[in-house]
Image: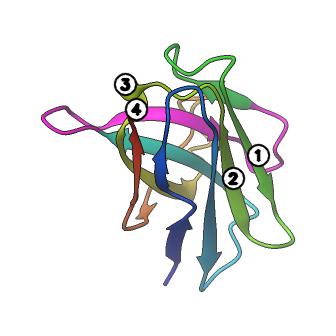
């Protein structure tokens, strides 16, 4: 059984930065896609970023391109989300997710997200 635990959320002023971490336990996720999703109050959950198992491929939502960076450390079974130039529109609960590749499909659609963390709150306000 895989467990994902997010950390690093908090409150920050507009223009500030936060770094989210997601530690996986139970099984190695070295062959899994990993990603970050978020859900703001009253809105549907949306994908923020995803990364391939080896870390060479990434995908970002248009709203975060150039501001957020996803990375992973497979030795530590951990994925990160560096968030810079935060705006109030980034306020949401951020969820880490992981899952095996669907080899019948191409990147980025081959990513499946089977495992989910509990989420960490990010609040951006002045």
Separation of marks 2 and 3 at Cα, in angstroms:
20 Å
Closer to us: mark 4 or mark 1? 4
Between the C-alphas of marks 1 and 3, the distance is: 22 Å
**Label 1, label 2: how far apart the Cα atoms are:** 5 Å
Q: Name the residue that disc number 2 marks.
A: 80
**What label does residue 56 carry, if any?**
none
Residue 10 lies in the magenta stretch:
no
Majority secondary structure of the magenta segment? loop
Q: Compared to 4, does 90 lie above or below? A: above
Point out the stretch of residues depicted in magenta: 40-57
Q: Secondary structure at mark 4?
A: loop
Residue to which mark 4 is pinned: 126
Q: Could you tell me which residue is drawn at 52 percent across and 45 percent down?
A: 36
Asked if marks 1 and 2 touch (Cβ < 8 Å), the reply is yes
Where's residue 105, x and y in %? 57, 31
> Which of the two discs, 3 and 4, labels the residue nearer the N terminus?
3
- Residue hosting label 1: 71
């Amino acid at each position: 059984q895989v467990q994902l635990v997010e950390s690093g959320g908090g409150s920050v002023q507009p223009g500030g930065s936060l770094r989210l971490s997601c530690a996986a336990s139970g099984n190695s996720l070295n062959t899994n896609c990993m990603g970050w999703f978020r859900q703001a109050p009253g809105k549907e959950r949306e994908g923020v970023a995803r990364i391939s198992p080896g870390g060479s491929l990434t995908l970002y939502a248009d709203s975060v391109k150039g501001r957020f960076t996803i990375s992973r450390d497979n030795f530590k079974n951990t994925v990160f989300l560096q968030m810079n130039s935060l705006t109030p529109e980034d306020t949401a609960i951020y969820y880490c997710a992981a899952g095996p590749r669907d080899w019948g499909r191409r990147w980025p659609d081959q990513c499946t997200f089977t495992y989910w963390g509990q989420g960490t709150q990010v609040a951006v306000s002045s």
